[in-house]
Each structure stands twice: as C-alpha cells, then as structure tokens.
Image: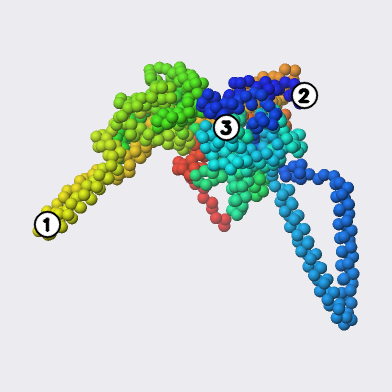
Amino acid sequence: VLAMVCNKLPSPLDITAERVEKLMCVGARTFDSLPPETQELKNAFMKCSSEGTAPVIVFVSKMFAVDAKALPQNKPRPLTQEEIAHRRELAKRRHAEKLAANQGKELSEKPPSENSSEVAENTGDTKGEEQQLTGQVEIVTSKAMKQEADNKESFIAFARVFSGVVQRGQKIFVLGPKYDPAESLHKLSSQCSATNDLPLVPHMTCCTLENLYLLMGRELEDLEEVPAGNVLGIGGLQDFVLKSATLSTSPACPPFTPLNFEATPIVRVAVEPKHPSDMPQLVRGMKLLNQADPCVQVLIQETGEHVLVTAGEVHLQRCLDDLKERFAKVEISVSAPIIPFRETITRPPKVDMVNEEIGKQQKVAVIHQTKEDQNKIPEGIQVDSDGLVTISTPNKQATLSVRAMPLPEEVTRLLEENSDLIRTMEQLNTSLNEDKKGHEINQKTLDRIKEFKQKLEQNLQGRKWRNAVDQIWSFGPRKCGPNILLYNFEGYKRSVWQCLGNAVKEVSKYRDFDNSIISGFQLATLSGPMCEEPLMGVCFTVEKWEINKVGEMLSTSSQDSGECDATEHKQNEDTTLTSSCTDEVRSGNEPQDSGQSVPKSSEKINKHKGEVLLADCYGPFSGQLIATMKEACRYALQAKPQRLMAAMYTCEIMATAEVLGRVYAVLSKREGRVLQEEMKEGTDVFIIKAVLPVAESFGFADEIRKRTSGLASPQLVFSHWEIISSDPFWVPTTEEEYLHFGEKADSENQARKYMNAVRKRKGLYVEEKIVEHAEKQRTLSRNK
C-alpha cells in the first residue's frame, strides 16, 4: 500500500495554480482582492522551496491525543557508561549509610546508665531517622507527580509543510481559521516577525515549536528540522490550536480552508457527572475530547446541559469511553440519545387511511376534527378555507395576512446544499445595507449565486409560484435554512438578490419595521408548533401588511423622539429662565403672568408622552410585530396538514444468502426500507442497501449481528431527511376507518409516538390519558 502511495500520489511541485488560489481564498474572497504581500506567497507555494530564505507555511489539519509515555523524551533508553558508574557510586553510598544506621541502633539498645555520651549519640540517630522519613516522603510525592505526568494526555498537531524549513525552537505565527491578513497587515510592519513585540491582532498568536516528530505508525521519532513537502507531528500546540490552523513566519499568509468531513454529527446526548463535585474535571475532559476528535461537537445548551454531538452510535460509544477513561477520568451518567426531527407541511391527501377517496364516505365519527380545530383558534385571528391567516398586533395598529405552502422537494434539497452560499449572500447584503465598502465580491461567487437563482426559478414554476424567486424576502432559520419568506403586497420592494446589483433603496412606511417581520419568521421557523423542532421545506407568504396612520406616526415619532425630547427640554429651560428674569425685573408686581408659559410647554410634553404611552402599554411596536408574525406563521402552519420529518441513515449490509431473511426481519421491525440488493460476483455475499430512521438505529448493529450469528455487518451513514407519512393528529372519522382500526385506533401511530417523546423531553404538554381503554373493574375479594 505504501509503495502505491509513493508511486501514485503527485509531488508537491506538481500543484496547480488554481488549487493554490483555492487554498488561499476562504469563503467569498477572490485571489485578486487579497493584499499584494499575500499574493506574493503564491510563488512560495508553487516552488515548494526548502531554502532558508523561503517563508515557512504549514497547515495543521487536526490535533490528536497521545499518551505521554509514548513521547520519545519519556521513553526508557539504554544507559551510557558514565551513567552506569554514577548509579553504582550512589548504590555503594546508600549501602554504607544503611550499615552505619544499623550500628547506631545496636548502640542505642545498650543500658542508659553506662555513659552520658550515649544520649548525644541517640539524638544523632533520631535526627538521621527524621531525615530518612523526609526523604521517603519526597520519593512518594515525586512518584505521584511522575504518575500524574505519565497519565497526562499530550496533543500532537498533524501537519504538512508547504514551503520553507520548520526547525525546532522556531518562533512562528499561529493563524486561526477566521484570520484576515487584509485587516491585520495595516497594524503590523511589513518586515515584522514572530520574535518581535507585536500589537494584539484578532485570531493570531505567536508560539515556539517545542518538538517535531516523524510519524512512524504508532511510534514517534524526534526531529530537528523538516523541509517542505513532508508530513510531520508538532508538539506543544494544544494551547494555541483547537482543531485546525495555519502556521507561518509571514503575517501576510492567509488561513487555509478547513477540511470537510463526510460524516455529519447528528446524534446528541446530555452528559453529567455522577458526583456533582466532579463537574470541573468533566468540563475539562469535554474540552480535551473536542480538541482530540475533529468530528465531535461539544455544546452547552440554554438549559445548562453539556451536550455531545456525534456521528452515530459507535462513534458516540467511543467518545464516551474516551471521556471516562482518558480525558475526564470520572464516572458519568448519560441521557438517552436526543434525536433531531424537523416539522413540515404537505398537500391535503386525496385518500384516507384505508385508501378511500376523501369526501365520498359517510361521516359517522363522534370526533369532529374540523370543529375542534376551529375551537383551538383564539379570538381575533381569522383563518380562511384556503389557509390564509389574518392577525393584528395587540395595539391594533398593524394587520398581517400570512399563508403557508409546502416547498417542492427539489427546492428544499437545493436550499440545504447551498446553505453556505445563502450565508455568504446574507453577509454581502448586510454590508451593502450598512454602506460598508467590504471586500470585493468574487466573480465565481456571483456566478454561483446567479446559477442558484436560475435553479430556483426552474424548480418554482406554475401559477402559484409566479415571480416567487424575485419576491424572496429571507431564508430561515438562522437566515440560511431550508424555508422561504415571500412578500406579495404592494408598496414594498426588498430582495435577497441585492448582491447581484438589484439593490433598490426606497423610503416607505414598511422600511422601518421590515426587520421585525423577518425576525418573527426566523423565530417561527426555529421552533414549530408540533414539538418545538425547526421547520423544513415550508414557504410563508405575507399577502397583506397594513400599518394604520397612528402606526406610521409611531414609526416617525420613534425615530425623532430623541430630537423632540431634546428640543422640548431646551424650550422648557429657556422658558423657566425668562420667567425668572421677568420675576426679578417686575419685582413681584405681576406674579401670576410670569408662570403662564411653563404650563403650556408641560401640556405639550404630556400630550407627546400620552401618544408614546399609547404604544408602550403593549411594548415597543417592533416587538409587537415580531410576536404577531411568529403567531401568524404558527397558525398558518396549523391550517395545513402537518407532518414530522425523521433523519435517515443509509445502511449498507453485507450478508450471506442463509441469513438474508433474518436481515430483512430486523430491518422491517425497525421501520427500515430496502432500496437495492445485489450479489457480489464470484461470492455468495449479498450487498443490501437500505434506509433506516436514526431514531430506530440504536442497538441495530448488535441486534443484526446476534440474529445472523455475526454473518452480517451493517455500516450506517447519515443520508437525508424524510417525511413520516402518518399524521400525528389522526383519529378515525369514517365508517371504513372505524371498521379497520377500531373505535380506539389501537394501532400505534409512529409519528405521534415520536412527537410525544420529544414533547416529554422538552417539558411540553403531552395529551395522554393515565388510564387508557379501561373496560372492567376487578375487585379482589378478601380471603376469609
């Protein structure tokens, strides 16, 4: 394998100019927009020079933990002749001291009446014993310290040298992933180095390379220097690098684009120590685990829970074992896995649960769902038959009409794939709105945005999606998610495509509060009504937004309130001064006229304050709009058929022909679905491709191995989100459904089970009876 690696992998000298530019440009930056000092480093990349004058450029792709005993400096080594002679001398000296101590004991055992001089000898012996005890204590403490040092985990950076020669003891710049050379170069001189005293620059520190290692499988070998083109391990960077970084002797070097991992962290668990006093060790251990594993994520939620996010069940178990045994070294208790779900809406179904056309059967149900749904909607909110929700703010100064529609699957997938591009668009739009002269937009990025817009237009076709792409107001949640907000009312123009040169600067009554509508949409998409999970594949259209005249006055007064207060305060002061002057001049002849100007100004102030209080009794107008928009989105969502979306794994199973039936039995038991089955040529092994919900995947690998006696081995990788077809709120309503499912609908609804489990975990209300379907009461007679 290593010979093939040497023969087939290209030399660092064969790197293309396009690849170098791609490495040096992070995000939406163009190579031409980088500072000239940074552009000059391209030649150093291309030459891959090992000369002393060449700038050192090293990329650290990850950090990995190594037992301190495995480091070369801590390994036992053969002793030299001088060290052997020295140890022999020490042994002889200790032997002589022991003999002397034994003789002293023999003398002390003699009767005390013999000589008074023996008392002095005894005191000398006790001193010797005390010295021995202190020596033993020192040896024990040194051993304990040595054990702690041995148990300590050391972090080594896995790195590659792209230019120059890396030497031990060299001082070098550590550049974080968010470092921007354009912002920092004007603070630093062009000839500065890591040895100089430098001002504070964000995302940049200086460090000394303590140890360089050659990575020989599990072994590490000490190195003095490493030339360009080589892979190496660097010790002593754990305090400077979290997961990845760029090392360079030049501050003009840009940070490299971080590595992308195929495995997506999706399974999360809450972790806490069994003994609360061990919490500091757990926090420290989780930090170390986060640094050691590039695929794990460590979070602290708003509730205060410490959460681990991992790629799957096996990865989770490995992380928990490492946390217990290597990093935290404390007993921990782990919650049940927290499975993520998404909420969405679908088109109204044409057939019911027994495949009968809806509307043709006779309704015999006692439960009338439509009446219940109408009763749920509070007063003041109007819901049309089409699902259009009309709602007003608490002070009745603004009215919103919102409709929810399901997005086509292709559009949802497109939004998910281009989340980074949408985030870049949002950054560019904010810089344009704030009139900041930010970095130039990369032409490639502009082309990508245009292509993204064209794809959206291709997939959003039809009468109901007319001009929808140009009317996109925002994406959500977090302004880069798979949901869309559209505006479809007159007198307003704002689009997410401003970065393409479509910026329209206008002054309208809506302009002051449009961010409140967007914020309400972001909150609504972040937590849906079913179980407070994020929404996915939903389009909200604002079809009407009316602001009354008082609302317009509030918007203008809120802007000018500061100026008004200042001017009125000045007028008040002037009037009081003039009144005091006239009092002095008139010397009390007309005391009533002097104070008349003061009440007039105070009346004006009171009127103005009354107007402001009219708005403030319900809170700020912008806050009311946020809450109203959130509620409108929620009710619009509830007016449509709601569904849960489950995270799905792609499952690849290799199994022999004898155990195929058992494999299918395990998959069907766990709601899995087989996509493909093919036989490997020349063998009796079948390769089965299936999809499996993440919620049902725990214990799947162990169960399939047990059922097949180890003849089938599954491999799970996160694939996509899939709508669970069953309605979580379904109850039987027709005669056919009653005949098929029974009056109580005893068959378990999978979507409702998932929804209730999430609601219980989050402390939300769950509608379930303590005693279900009680039919008999059994009384136990007392034994006589």
Residue situated furthest bottom in the rendering: 113
- The dot on residue 252 is 3
Element marked by disc 1:
helix
Position of residue 168 in the picture relative to residue 770 (left or right): right
Element marked by disc 2:
helix
Residue with the mark numbered 2: 3
Look at the image and tell me in which quarter the C terminus lies.
Answer: bottom right
Q: Nearer the viewer, residue 160 or 476?
A: 160
Residue 149 point in image, percent of width and height: 72, 49
Image: 208 above or below 114: above
What colouring method underlies this structural image? rainbow
- The dot on residue 390 is none
User: First in sequence: mark 1 or mark 3?
Assistant: 3
User: First in sequence: mark 3 or mark 2?
Assistant: 2
Q: Which residue is pictured at 57% across the width and 38% down the height?
A: 204
Tell me the kind of residue under disc 2.
Ala
Q: Nearer the viewer, residue 330 or 116?
A: 116
Q: Which residue is pictured at 81% across the width and 68% down the height?
A: 128
Tell me the kind of residue under disc 1.
Arg
Image quadrant assignment for residue 123? bottom right
Element marked by disc 3:
loop
Q: Nearer the viewer, residue 9 or 116?
A: 116
Q: Which residue is pictured at 29% across the width and 37% down the height?
A: 555
Residue with the mark numbered 1: 586
